[in-house]
Image (cartoon, helix red, strand yellow):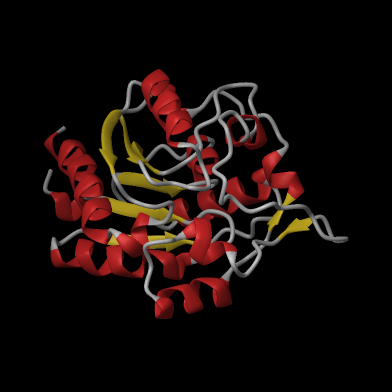
């Protein structure tokens, strides 16, 4: 099986949309890897998993699922039969019975991590200054402007639901640990990656390396794609 038969499905986390993957999509295309950014409504974990499954339904052939941040919980909850491997990019990987909130709050918060709370609609927005301080501190001013402009809020319902048996217990997984992450404690990332028995790549990158370190993200996805191709 050649890698051109394996698709990469890229899943954005909270406060982002598919455009956060644009640099990675370009680089994967240059390697002959077909990539699709799956849109999530961020309205509840169930809604987000259903949206991902609809994207996966449209793809023929094997898939490497890639999740950033909150989307780690979403890719771990997918059940599509064409998924062959998982890649976690500074992501959250709750175990069975855990919620996104449980793992997100596990470690000590970074001093520059934003204080977040839901609005009257039950939606959590990231404060404007948090993009430069914690979400993507290595991004350029232009990139920060776009990240803040396209942000999508996440519903409280997305982070409070316990997950079922996660897919990483049954499939090979990769984990890019972001050593300079100010949103998700790097120690927490190491803890999750370790209990998953993931192939770990630890790099001194911020929380949104798809924007600020796209070559590194492309490399780890490429590794997973090659592994699936070889099998």
Q: Is residue 19 left or right of residue 224?
A: right
Q: Identify the residue at horizontal 75%, vertical 48% (top origin).
A: 156
Name which residue lies at 44% across and 29% down: 187
Q: Residue at x 31, y 53 (%)?
A: 8
Quadrant for the N terminus, please: top left
Tell which of 150 and 9 is nearer to you: 150
Query: Looking at the image, how many numbered discs can be counted on the residues?
Result: 0
Report the front residue among 47 and 92.
92
Residue at x-position 67% and y-position 44%? 46
Residue 44: percent from left, percent from top: 70, 48
Who is closer to the viewer here, 166 or 174? 174
- The reply to whether residue 157 is visible in this rendering is yes
Query: Quick one: quadrant of the C terminus?
Result: top left
Query: What x and y, as percent, mark residue 83?
Result: 37, 40
The answer to which quarter of the image holds residue 106 is top right
Asked which quadrant contains residue 226, the reply is: top left
Visible residue check, residue 16: no
Position of residue 89 measured from the top left corner of the image (x, y, whole percent): 38, 45
Q: Position of residue 29 (x, y in %)?
A: 20, 66
As drawn, 123 above or below 23 = above
Is residue 68 positioned above or below 120 on the image? Answer: above
Q: Is residue 2 above or below residue 124?
A: above
Farthest front residue in view: 111
């Amino acid at each position: 099986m050649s890698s051109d038969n394996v698709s990469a499905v890229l899943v954005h986390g909270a406060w982002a949309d598919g455009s956060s993957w644009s640099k990675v999509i370009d680089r994967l295309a240059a390697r002959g890897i077909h990539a699709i950014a799956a849109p999530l409504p961020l309205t509840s974990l169930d809604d987000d998993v259903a949206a991902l499954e609809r994207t996966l339904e449209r793809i023929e052939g094997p898939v490497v699922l890639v999740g950033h941040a909150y989307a780690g919980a979403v890719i771990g909850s997918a059940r599509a039969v064409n998924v062959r491997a998982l890649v976690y990019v500074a992501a959250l990987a709750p175990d069975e019975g855990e919620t996104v909130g449980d793992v997100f709050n596990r470690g000590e918060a970074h001093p520059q991590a934003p204080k977040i709370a839901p609005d009257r609609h039950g939606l959590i927005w990231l404060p404007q200054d948090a993009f430069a301080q914690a979400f993507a501190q290595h991004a350029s001013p232009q990139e920060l402007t776009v990240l803040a402009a396209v942000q999508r809020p996440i519903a409280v319902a997305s982070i409070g639901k316990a997950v079922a048996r996660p897919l990483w217990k049954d499939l090979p997984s990769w984990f890019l640990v972001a050593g300079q992450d100010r949103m998700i404690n790097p120690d927490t990332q190491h803890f999750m990656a370790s209990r998953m028995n993931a192939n770990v790549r630890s790099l001194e990158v911020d929380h949104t390396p798809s924007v600020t370190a796209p070559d590194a993200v492309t490399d780890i996805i490429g590794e997973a794609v090659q592994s699936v191709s070889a099998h």
